[in-house]
Image: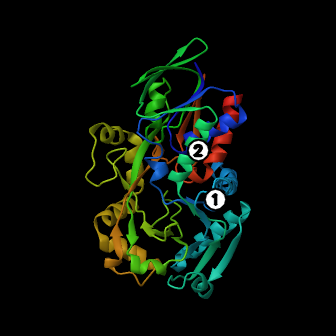
Amino acid sequence: MYDVVVVGAGIVGLASAWTLLQRFPHKKLLVLEKESDCALHQSGRNSGVIHSGIYYKSGSFKARLSAAGNRSMLAFCRDHDLPHAICGKLIVATHERELPGLQTLYERGTANWLELRKLDAEQLKEIEPHATGLAALHVQTTGITDYRQVCQRLAALIQERGGHIRFNTTVESALANGPGLTLETSAGAFQARLALNCAGLHSDRVARAWGLKPRVRIVPFRGEYYELAAPKRSLVKSLIYPVPDPSFPFLGVHFTRGLDGSVHVGPNAVLSLKREGYLKRDFCWHDAIDTLAFPGFWKLALRHVRSGGSEVLRSWSKTLFLNDARLLLPELQAEDLIPCAAGVRAQALHRNGGLVDDFLFATQPRALHVLNAPSPAATCALEIGGLIADKLAT
């Protein structure tokens, strides 16, 4: 029997497993992953940003964990010789109507003890000469890394400490069995005293298969990116973001410079009719029905008809996507944008159509479920792991 079984070898599952083995080195631990390697979905298909925590309400899990996560993730990268950089981020107001939102972010960031600078148009140009805007915030602690490499290192550390990882193993159900649980999987049954569900895009289904009735449903949103053609990469020195719409859960089209010098543009955010649907044509009846039969989805859609419709149109029209990108970087031309790989975000949604805007956990006897861990979960992964270790230890 294993002391702990972790379901999911994304960054939250791996960070939690590693933290547990650090605190309890004699525990017998197993990570189960349905794919052939770790970090093949959300953890390996993101922009690689090490966030600061400026967007999150003071007192929320995201606010509490982001600043600490920024420090711990950077320290982890330094300690393990993983590629990273502290490049800073600009949040830019391009219209007068965005200035109050920029001020709100400044106040929120200050409340979260972040290093911030207010910039006027000229000061903005000093940092990003090709960007344009009326004013900006410079978030100095924002960084970048490669989260797939972070996950690979965590997986190696887990195994070095005596933990086990089994790939190509899908968890199908869990039943209480005496002092623990019996996990039925595609590779047979495993016994565990405690189990942790970090299944990401499938976390709600795993929870239901284990007998929990979560009050939320995972709705997948595909984030579609372009990247700048090589001759235009010099237009972006760091990270450039717009002021986000506070009523919409996504940050808008932005520019992210990678460790290899590439610059990603995006993402937009559109409903995916497959939970792992990285292409526009990807479709799964089970996943589509799961979303479309959920009342919360329709309430969300009606509430955000205009902004959601804009995202869909921008998905199919490069011209519209370019127009939004040019608000921040006016020199861009259509030929400067090259399509690249998309990601899918697992967003938990209430039945009333409300988006779960913080990390969400649910408990059962002998089991803990991570039901919502979108961005900045990668940044916060080591801190989330510590929080989970605390919960499982009690």
In the image, 218 versus 368, the foreground residue is 368
Residue 367 in view, yes or no: no
Identify the image quadrant of the N terminus: top right
The spot of residue 333 in percent (x, y) is 35, 81
Front-most of residues 33 and 195: 33
Three-letter amino acid code at disc 2?
Leu
Query: Within 10 angstroms of label 2, few (less than 14), some, or many (20 or more) residues?
Result: many
Rendered position, 334 above or below 151? below
Q: Could you classify mark 1 by the number of other residues whose Cα lies within 10 Å: few (under 14), some (14-19), or many (20 or more)?
A: many
What secondary structure is found at the residue carrying circle 2?
Answer: helix
In this rendering, position of residue 331 left or right of residue 251: left
Is residue 62 visible in the rendered structure shown here?
Answer: yes
Q: Which residue sits at x=53%, y=57%?
A: 146
Q: Which residue is mark 2?
A: 154
Which amino acid type is shown beneath numbered disc 1?
A: Gly
Q: Which residue is mark 1?
A: 53
Marker count (numbered) = 2
Label 1, secondary structure: give it.
Answer: loop
* Left or right of 83 in this view: 336: left
Q: Which of the two discs, 2 and 1, labels the residue nearer the N terminus?
A: 1
Residue plotted at (37% across, 75% down): 229
**Which residue occupies the foreground of this view, 35 or 104?**
35
* Residue 199 marker: none
- At a point 44% along the width and 23% down the height, the residue shown is 173
Q: Percent position (x, y) of residue 188?
A: 42, 20
